[in-house]
Image (cartoon, coloured by chain):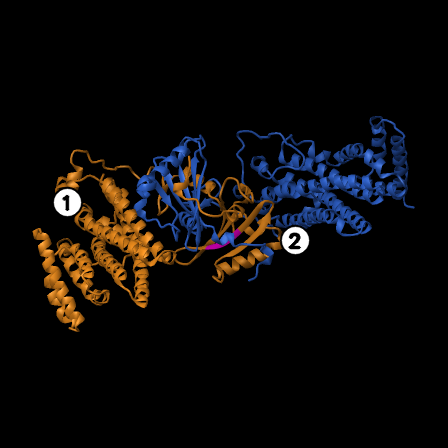
Chain colours: A orange, B blue
Amino acid sequence: MTELLKAREYKKEQLKELLLRIHRGESVEKLKEEFRQVLSGISPLEIPIIEQELVKEGISAKDIAKMCDLHVELFREAVKGTDELEEKDLPDGHPLKTLYQENKEILKDAEILNLYAKTLATTKDERMREEILGVLEEIVGNLRKIGSTHYNREEMLIFPYIERRGLTAIATVLWTKHDEIRFMIKYLAELLRKRSEMPWEEFVERFKAKAGEAAFALSDMVFRENNIFYPTLKALLSEGEWKAIRMQEKEAGFYKVNPPAWDPGEDVKPLHPWEINPELSVEQLLSLPKEVQGALRGQPLEFDRSKLKREGDIDLGTGYLNLKELKAIFEALPVDVTFIDRDDRVRFFSPGERIFERTLSVLGRPVQLCHPPKSVHIVNKILQAFKEGRKREATFWLRLGEKYVYIRYVPLFDENGEYMGTLEITMDIAPYKAIEGEKRLLDWRD
Amino acid sequence: MTELLKAREYKKEQLKELLLRIHRGESVEKLKEEFRQVLSGISPLEIPIIEQELVKEGISAKDIAKMCDLHVELFREAVKGTDELEEKDLPDGHPLKTLYQENKEILKDAEILNLYAKTLATTKDERMREEILGVLEEIVGNLRKIGSTHYNREEMLIFPYIERRGLTAIATVLWTKHDEIRFMIKYLAELLRKRSEMPWEEFVERFKAKAGEAAFALSDMVFRENNIFYPTLKALLSEGEWKAIRMQEKEAGFYKVNPPAWDPGEDVKPLHPWEINPELSVEQLLSLPKEVQGALRGQPLEFDRSKLKREGDIDLGTGYLNLKELKAIFEALPVDVTFIDRDDRVRFFSPGERIFERTLSVLGRPVQLCHPPKSVHIVNKILQAFKEGRKREATFWLRLGEKYVYIRYVPLFDENGEYMGTLEITMDIAPYKAIEGEKRLLDWRD
């Protein structure tokens, strides 16, 4: 027996002892300190292995479930140690601190998943099984959100900053692994949903195995991120970059944390990926984690220096377009639009083939004169309701030969709530009504 | 008997004589000159009245149908006289000349409608009836196009020029009458379609009466336009205005004429309604038709001097928007768009609530890095097919919770066929799939 295994055996015996004392009724709170001592020095990744052995040796699932909260708390503390160095000098609300905090939650939930999956496998009582299945459904449902929050924020908000600096490989590898994890968790959810379609033993064995794999992959990702990705970010990203990231984090949301506002100061300008200087200084290079330095060795860094804003571009707030592109976009839209301004005059219509033709003569024309006189009173009523804020849309639909025309009027307001005008949107919905089933990107054939 | 009736009686007798000679087999071509003499001096509007009397007196419908082409040609010549004064100094392809020419076609077709409707009423032979009904269906089908071409061009292209000059009443009255005529012709089409649902006698009497009304209204409109509206246009519109109109006429199309190109000269700048000086000179006022002068008496002309282009507006070719309006329009669109430029970099996404969230970090990012690594090869294949012109779109659809997401990629090209980039359009089509029936403007309730 190796030293490592001997040490683990010893810890296991101690843990077993403590669990038995909980079973006999001793106060969980009182035992906390002893748990802490037992767990100190073990890698958090070893805990599930030890637990698994305990379950094998007959500690009841019920007892393990009972100590779950305590265990999680201790586990969290154990994990804390490893990141403390990185995290301690970060202010609350700093995006990097938030990432570390989420990773603790993820590690904890991965652990809980594994624990409950094993508990389920050893539970004989029917009612108990149902109870555990209910908990597992909740856990798996939660875990699915990791992909849409924590991973998504990294992929969408943060990767662009390291890609610009030529570190695209890190981004690609992490994203590939994120997707594998997303798939694993989705698979667990499906397995839970289809459990009645297979024998119990088959289900529970498969679930336990897959939950174990998912828990391992989740934990593994936490360690990759905490030890490689986040230190890289820390070495490279400036306050302005973190400020820009912080400003957009809410869009994707967070995993089980709720970071406070954070602003490095009014004098710090938020920096978007296309605004940074992507070159790495020697100092930055040397402060990168060893693994990253190793990966970069022997190949030139391909800094991405492409400029986003070109001469004459229109700054739309969410991008830069030249006039030609802007016109082409309006022409390619699958909807036709016509805009009348606050004075009811036609100010713009989208070009190209339209359901209801428009010619340049219509520009500047009061909308009341653009309609058959018979229906003008309705047009006026709708506009009045819009201007008074009583209605936020008016929709109509009618058949026109092969077309099923859907017309939507919406009032537009500026940031002060001032009425700016009304947009008419017209589209043929017949093709959409005919669509069935699914056709996904991976179904595409050249 | 009044002189007028006596003269009509005389003409009628002469016409009858000519028709009998056709019946006996004389050459239509040979009789043309004699017809012309008979018809000269009769108002074109009298012709249907005379024909109606001939039918009553027993001239067979077959014979009247036989002379139809000749009649139409002569009728056209007769009509020509009345407009010749206005039309003769206009060059071919001039929009005003085209309007006059269309009116001749309209007058002729109104006449034919009336003639055939009456012929139908006196026809006993079943096969003959079916034949005439077939012709009537074609005639009515043709007449419906008057609304979408001739009237539509006036309403959309030409009215704005007189509205700017304060002559809104003319436009409103004409449009109201256009709509009445549209309704009459639509009614005739419906009547023809539903003819088997009522007794023959009821159908044919109703049809004859309604066809007579429609023919009268169509002719009446021709005379209103030729005698009031067109002379008004002639007095007011400059070459630049006609040039702008000519440039846009094709959009709506023409009624049975095919005008050649016309350009008053390269030095003449096309003038859109919002670019003209709307004030009337005394000279212009005096050259207006008496009826228009009369209508304008006693009220000040309300010239429309509103400016279309404001300080800082973006000229989109089909209108002028400021940045705030442009952003609000993109936000209000029922589709989300993302644009990647010719270098595959994300350049713009539409703001606001989206199906697939986008953050500013994505700007400038190569699209290949915005996708899960697993599907990047498909993205590249699609883009390659777009750039090589092998595909003009790629569409996908999938369920996402309550949403039925439809995604469409389209390549954009500039006027020289150069690839400018690709637009991603995303929309939830679930609401459209649920739409049934119709809801029209007049159904709107406040």
Disc 2 packing (10 Å; few <14; some 14–19; many ≥20)? few
* Residue A102 picture location, percent across and down: 23, 56
Q: Name the one closer to the observer, A50 or B365.
A: A50
Whether residue A444 appears in magenta in the rendering, the answer is no
Mostly what secondary structure, the magenta segment? strand
Residue A218 is left or right of residue B44, and the answer is: left
Q: Tell me the chain of label 1.
A: A
Q: Are marks 2 and 1 in contact (CB under 8 Å)?
A: no
Disc 1 packing (10 Å; few <14; some 14–19; many ≥20)? some
* Displayed quadrant of residue B287: top right
Query: Magenta residues?
Result: A407-411
Cα distance between the residues tagged 2 and 1: 89 Å
Question: Please, what is the three-letter code of the amino acid marked with disc 2?
Answer: Gly
* Residue A16 picture location, percent across and down: 14, 64
Whether residue A410 appears in magenta in the rendering, the answer is yes
Q: Which residue is mark 2?
A: B298
Element type at mark 1: loop
Q: Name the one closer to the observer, B302 or B140.
A: B140
Q: Is residue B199 visible?
A: yes
Q: Residue furthest right?
A: B1
Q: Is residue B241 visible?
A: no
Residue A289 has which mark?
Answer: 1
Question: Please, what is the three-letter code of the amino acid marked with disc 1?
Answer: Pro
Residue B120 has which mark?
Answer: none
Number of marks in picture: 2
Q: Residue furthest left?
A: A3
* Residue A307 picture location, percent across and down: 29, 38
* Residue B404 picture location, percent across and down: 45, 51
Element type at mark 2: loop
Q: Name the one closer to the observer, B234 or A26.
A: A26
